[in-house]
């Protein structure tokens, strides 16, 4: 391998950046365990970041449980979707991960997956359950999984 190949390979992003839409995934009707979300993403490669986005109504117990499981918890007083979308898009464009994984049922994240795809990233949609699955997210992603199937 010559110097050009070594430089090129050293600048290729690696790993999976996991972004979890807390308000749309951690709902009683889905009975989702954060460990299951994490494991689904880890099957695609080593995690370079694991972020759980919550709104200001999140309980201290939920925040503590997520942090115990290794999640960086982002609590926002504004729209959780906007903060998650901006962060995930930045990761994709800046090449900070090979794979962008989004756990949600919200079709608002379809443009994020499309932008990541355009920048040569793999994308992975994690649905919280069969009735919580977004076909738009699943179709936009290069790979997808529905928890509980």
Image (cartoon, rainbow, N blue to C red):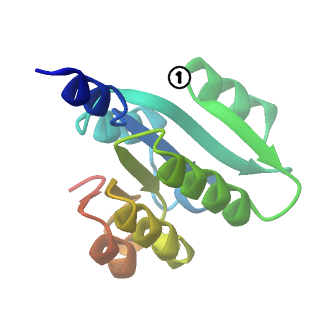
> Which residue, as the protein is rendered here, is positioned at the far bottom?
136
Q: Is residue 121 left or right of residue 143?
A: right
Q: Is residue 86 left or right of residue 117?
A: right
> Residue at image x 33%, y 57%?
123
Q: Secondary structure at mark 1?
A: loop
Of 40 and 101, nearer the camera is 101
Name the quarter where the N terminus is drawn: top left
Of 46 and 92, nearer the camera is 92
> Residue at image x 53%, y 22%?
69
> Residue at image x 40%, y 29%?
47
Observer able to see residue 26:
no
> Residue at image x 56%, y 53%?
88
Name the quarter where the C terminus is drawn: bottom left
In percent of width and height, residue 68 lies at 59, 18
Of 140 and 10, nearer the camera is 10
In percent of width and height, residue 84 lies at 64, 55
Which residue does the numbered mark 1 point to in the structure image?
Answer: 69
> Which residue, as the protein is rendered here, is positioned at the far front?
3
Q: What is the count of numbered marks?
A: 1
Q: Residues within 10 Å of mark 1 (few under 14, many from 20)?
A: few
Q: Is residue 13 above or below residue 83?
A: above
Of 35 and 86, nearer the camera is 86
């Amino acid at each position: 391998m010559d110097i050009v190949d070594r430089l090129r390979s050293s600048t290729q992003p690696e790993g999976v950046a996991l972004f979890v839409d807390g308000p749309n995934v951690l709902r009683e009707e889905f009975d989702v365990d954060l460990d299951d979300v994490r494991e689904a993403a880890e099957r695609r490669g080593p995690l370079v970041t694991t972020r759980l986005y919550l709104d200001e109504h999140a309980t201290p117990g939920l925040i503590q449980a997520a942090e115990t499981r290794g999640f960086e918890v982002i609590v926002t007083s504004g729209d959780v979707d906007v903060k998650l979308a901006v962060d995930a898009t930045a990761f994709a464009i800046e090449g900070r991960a090979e794979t962008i994984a989004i756990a949600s049922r919200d079709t608002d994240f379809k443009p994020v997956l499309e932008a990541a795809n355009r920048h040569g990233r793999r994308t992975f949609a994690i649905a919280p359950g069969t009735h919580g699955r977004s076909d738009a997210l699943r179709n936009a992603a290069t790979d997808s999984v529905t928890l509980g199937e």
